[in-house]
Image: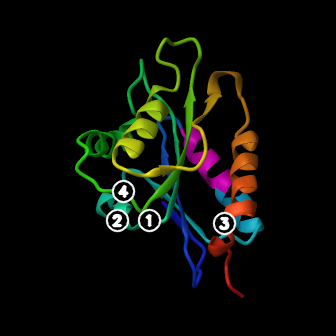
Amino acid sequence: MSSVCASAGKKIRILFGSETGTAEEFAFDLENSLQSSDYACEVSDLDDYDRTELPQESLVLLITSTYGNGEAPYNAEDMHAWLESQEADLSSVSFAVCGLGDTGYPAFAQAGKDFDQFLGDCGAERILPRFEIDACFDESVEPFIEIVQNWLSENGSHYKKTV
């Protein structure tokens, strides 16, 4: 599943790892918000995304749930393992991570924590502190969208769609 908005400039890549659909829904909520502010973006399921393209991305916003007791969701397992191996040079990539979880588990939002660490370990530049949502209590993705929008309003003019 992929949604695209065309641009002559740079594009924001929104990736999601989701077991039950919440992180996927949040990824499309983020895309809708960014599109309404005229940012060029594309949403991709981590399972469908060609990870060899990751080093060429400019800005990656990753939203992932945590499955079980700290594991990455099924559709994010391959990317998780690939990044953990630290084979990728992501020094030209900027990123932010939103991790979903259930505070009832000791490994709350662990997949988000892992992706945040792995991306940083591969040389990517963290643009925002990792954001965590307790999906068990139906917390909204809106605060994450707001901090992304604020960052983009100050730093993201080159992601605006051209008319």
Q: For marks 1 and 3, give the one nearer the viewer.
A: 3
Q: For marks 3 and 2, give the one nearer the viewer.
A: 3
Which residue position holds label 4?
A: 90
Mark number, residue 53? 2
Above/below status of 5 relative to 8: above
**Element class at badge 2:** helix
Q: For marks 1 and 4, give the one nearer the viewer.
A: 4
For marks 1 and 3, the one nearer the N-term is: 1
The answer to whether residue 80 is left or right of residue 65 is left
Are discs 1 and 2 less than 8 Å apart at CB? yes
Quarter occupied by residue 54: bottom left
For marks 1 and 4, the one nearer the N-term is: 1
Q: Which percent across, then down, holds residue 157?
A: 69, 72
The answer to whether residue 22 is left or right of residue 75 is right
Residue 16 belongs to the span the image colors magenta: no
Residue 26 belongs to the span the image colors magenta: yes
Are discs 4 and 3 less than 8 Å apart at CB? no
